[in-house]
Every structure is written in C-alpha cells, then in structure tokens.
Amino acid sequence: MTDTYSDLVNSKVGKQVASRLGLPRPVRLRRYAPDQPLVPGPVLVAGVGDAPLAARAADMLRGDAIDIIPVVAEGQRVGAVVLDLTQARELTDLDAFRTILGPALKRLAPSGRVVVFGGSMATAGTDPMLRATRRALEGVVRSIGKELRAGATANLVTVVEGEEANADAALRFFLSGRSAYVDGQVVTVGAASGGPAVAPDDWHTPLAGKIAVVTGAARGIGASIAEVLARDGATVVGVDIPSAGESLARNANRLGGTALQLDVTAPDAGRRIVDHARTRHGSLDIMIHNAGITRDKLLANMDESRWASVVDVNLGSVIRMNEAILAPDGLADGGHVVCVSSIAGIAGNRGQTNYAASKAGVIGLVTALGGSPDLYARRVTVNAVAPGFIETEMTAKIPLATRELGRRLSSLQQGGLPVDVAETVAWFSQDANAGVTGNVVRVCGQSLLGA
C-alpha cells in the first residue's frame, strides 16, 4: 500500500513545504539486504565498569570489518552506538547516558542504531538501589527512541550475568536493517539449556536446514514470514484454509516448500501439521502461529458469533495445536515457537475487544510456555511479536484520517511493512537465540499509543 503523504513530503518541492510548515517527514528506513553491511559506518562502543559486553561486541564487529571507535571525532558520523551498562549498580552510573551517549546522538547517521545492554532484573535480588538503577535503563532507552530522528532506533537488551555469550544474535538483530521497525523495545537474554547458544555457520542463512511451519501463509504478513524464513535458509510448510489454496500453493512452489490446506480450528490441526512436516520433510523445527481474523464491533453490539470466532481462531486454536506440536514427538528439541500477537493485546483498541482479548491471551500463553521447565530442558524457545500499524490489505480498508493517524503516531512516523514483522519472527527462530524465551517484541515503530 502506498504512503502518499510520505512520498509527497520527500519530493523536491514537498521537502521545502514540510520544512516551512513543520510537518513530519518520514524517511525511508534502512531494511535488510544480504549485500549490505551490518552497520553503515563506524560504531561507538563504550560502557561502565568492566563492561564485558562492550568488549564482546567490539570483537564481534571487528570480525565483520566494522570500525570501532572509543569517541566520536568532530564532524564524524557514526552508524551505531553500543553502550554496556550491565555493570551499572548505582544511580550515578546512569550519567553515562549523558556523558557518553548524549554527544554521540548528534552524530548518529540516518537509520542509525542505539543498543544498550543492561543487567537483568531477574538477578537483581531485593537490593533497592540495584533494581532502581536497572529499571531506570528502560525509561531512558524508551525516551531516547522518541528523541531520535531520521529513522534511527534505540533498544535495550538485558542480560543475565554469566550469559553474555547468548547476546550476540540480539546485538546483530538490533544493529541490522532487520530491526528497521523495532524501536524502544526491551529483550531479555538468559541461560540456554545445555550450554551457550550456537552461532550459525553463516549469519546470512541462520535457518539453513530447518523445517518451518507458518499458519496463515497465503497472503499478507504470513506470506512475508514464509518468504523471509525461506530466504534465511529454512524449508517452509505454508498452512492456510482451503479457500486460499491457490495462493498458498503458488507461494509454496515459489519458495521451494510445501502447502497444507487446513483450518487451524480443526480438532486434529496440530497433529496434521506435525505429521505433514515429519512425513514430507523429516522434522519440525520452527512453528509460527500467525493465522488470525478480525470481526470488529463495539462491545455493546458484539454478538456471540463474532466474539467466539475471533477468540477461537486467534487463541483457542493455538492452545489446541500446541498439545501436539509441543509433545515429545512434535517439535524437535532445540526448536522454536513464535506467536503473532498485536499491539491491540497490549494497548487495547476501540471496537476490537474480542481481538484484543485473543492477542493479550497469546502474550499470556507465551509467558507461561517461556517459563516451562519441560520446554527449557528441551531447549525449546517460545516468543511473540506484537505488530503495530503494518501496511496490509486490512489497514488499507481503514478510513483515511484514522489510517494517517495510525501511520504518524509513532517515533518513526510511518507504518511498518509485513517484512518488518517477518524479520523479527525469523530472528526469534534462530538457534543463536536459545537464551531468549518468553519475550514479546512490539514491531510498531515505537507507537505512541499504549505501553
């Protein structure tokens, strides 16, 4: 879907008009392409105390032939800033934001990145000062995201002490174009069962050899998820209802995968998915629960059918399918489950009480499964993405004024693309993310609506 306003204010004449009138001017975001560098420019890497993740990040980036700088020289542009505050223990340590990061922000390139590492609240104990300091990081990073311009983003990665080796994939994601529409988010990296997470042989194809199932894969976000997973090396099984069979088969053939026509609300849906993946491809390594519907109505006018159908498709079916998918003979050990929630499940949305209930329920499900000792022992991760305003057929039907507000009311001042959701799903699907589970990441450009 075309964003006419963005095209207009970025035209030669439109730039001048927008500047004179003080209108927002969204920029074209830096999105991932295999031939582009991880970061387009030098990276400032600094920290407080021993800063173990600063040293690790510097080594990793040098391996990618990226210049590391300790300070920003006069007139120099930086592609990103990595600030390690995992050793911050007192409020005075927070001054590093002002003294180190503050000056660097003035030199941040368009679509630049700010990645802050912090200590995990899970290991903060009951020390009031330590807990206050670590929680303060979140407030600062979210605020920085709202101050940045020209497509730049800021995100926080909290790391459990001793698990620094599991944070590489998160750093790569947040520095790269894969995270173009992820802003002001917090991800927690913990321990992975059986030892540290394993890096892929090639970071361009981190899903090589994996078998992935994507529900709702015939069009929209689901089709984009299937495409990105395949690009990253996975063999994809696309699942959708029989009426979407033609487009589903077309997508599957194009990506070199297979198609499974299936209603996800069927009692045996989970078993059929497992059987198809194992029979046709030998395994099931990645399960993406994307299928969903909307049946909008104000609650005062909501009928039973609208309520029940949305809750069952979006949430009930996922719970039922997981009984087979998460069984010992279902998803392979070391596998990954990613659920597609929504910002509506976090902030609510007028006329979508049924949809919000289902998507908030998905978050509850992910939180529960992410803390499952049985799944942890099997090295299975469960995470969720929560899209905000994404340019799809559904948002194209929204009235013009509402649609424009949805686009502009974010730190990035524009709607996201289906590929932005897909990139985050693919990142959660990497074995290198074995220490990331029970997380929910909003793909919303740091929407100004809701939490």
Image (spheres, grey):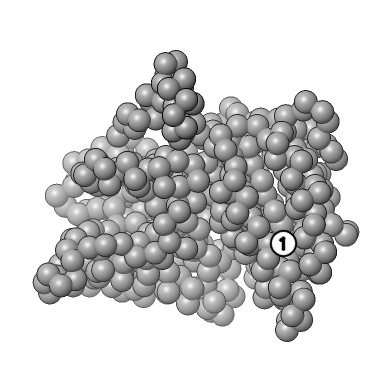
The residue at the far front in this view is 21
Residue 298 picture location, percent across and down: 18, 66
- Horizontal side of 354 relative to 176 (left or right) equals left
Q: Note whether 302 is above or below 151 in the view shown.
A: below
At which x and y percent is residue 433?
60, 57
Q: Is residue 86 above or below residue 81?
A: below
Q: Residue furthest bottom?
A: 126
Q: Position of residue 52 (x, y in %)?
A: 83, 57
71 relative position to 35: left or right: right
Which residue is located at x 41 percent, y 47 percent?
A: 409
Secondary structure under badge 1? strand
Q: Residue at x 82, y 28 (%)?
A: 74
Q: Nearer the viewer, residue 250 or 124?
A: 124
Residue beneath disc 1: 118
User: 351 left or right of 70?
Assistant: left
- Residue 301 appearing in the image: yes
Residue positioned most to the top: 12
Residue at x-position 56% and y-position 80%? 373
Q: Is residue 59 above or below residue 268?
A: above
Of the 4 image quadrants, the one containing the N terminus is top left
Residue 341 visible at all: no
- Residue 328 versus residue 364: which sits nearer the camera? 364
The crowding category of the residue bearing disc 1, from other C-alpha atoms within 10 Å (few below 14, some 14 to 19, many at least 20), is: many
16 and 296: which is toward the camera: 16
Residue appearing at x 62%, y 61% in the figure: 139
Q: Amino acid at mark 1?
A: Gly
Residue nearest the observer in this picture, 208 or 15: 15
Residue 213 horizontal/vertical position (percent)? 38, 54
